[in-house]
Image (cartoon, rainbow, N blue to C red):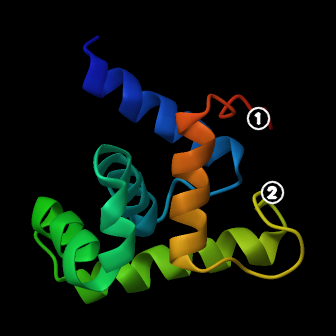
């Protein structure tokens, strides 16, 4: 397993443990967004202009579809009460992605379900 596959696997485990439902389309987009943001954290400052379109390009969809799908998967996790990355309010896309990136960068992605 090469480094990129290892990182993707780590991201997937982290998001699953965070309560993100894996059966939804937004899950794949979220994994890709976290991967891209880990490579270049500055993309979080230009999500609608850079991050979402880049993810969309990988999947053959528009950036606004990526944004909506990620928001939907966050909402689903929040509504079921599984999302452990926040206290009571639903996080924004940026908050969830940056939280995932920072947790993974600092090796705190070992949260178990």
Secondary-structure class at tag 2 = loop
Q: Which x, y percent locates residue 106?
A: 61, 33
Residue hosting label 2 = 84
In the image: residue 6, left or right of residue 12? left
- The outermost residue toward the top is 1
User: Which is more N-terminal, label 1 or label 2?
Assistant: 2
Q: Position of residue 48 (x, y in %)?
A: 29, 84
**Which residue is found at the position 65% from the left and 34% from the top?**
109
Which disc, if any, is residue 111?
Answer: 1
- The answer to the question of whether label 2 and label 1 lie on touching residues, with beta carbons closer than 8 A, is yes
Res. 38 mark: none
- x, y percent for residue 81: 85, 68
Residue drawn at (78%, 32%) of the image = 112
Image quadrant in which the N terminus is located: top left
Q: Quadrant of the C terminus?
A: top right
Q: Quadrant of residue 73?
A: bottom right
Work out whether 20 lies above or below 102. below
Q: Is residue 78 left or right of residue 54?
A: right
* Residue shown at 30% from the left, 78% from the top: 46
Instruction: Give the camera-side residue of 27 and 54.
Output: 54
Q: Position of residue 45 (x, y in %)?
A: 37, 75
């Amino acid at each position: 397993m090469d480094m990129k596959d290892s990182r993707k696997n780590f991201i997937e485990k982290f998001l699953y443990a965070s309560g993100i439902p894996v059966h939804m389309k937004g899950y794949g987009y979220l994994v890709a967004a976290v991967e891209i943001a880990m490579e270049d954290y500055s993309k979080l400052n230009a999500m609608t202009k850079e991050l979402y379109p880049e993810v969309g390009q990988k999947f053959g969809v528009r950036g606004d579809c990526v944004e909506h799908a990620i928001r939907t998967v966050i909402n689903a996790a929040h509504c079921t009460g599984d999302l452990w990355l926040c206290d009571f309010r639903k996080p924004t896309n940026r908050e969830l992605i940056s939280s995932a990136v920072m947790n993974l960068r600092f090796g705190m992605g070992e949260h178990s379900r």
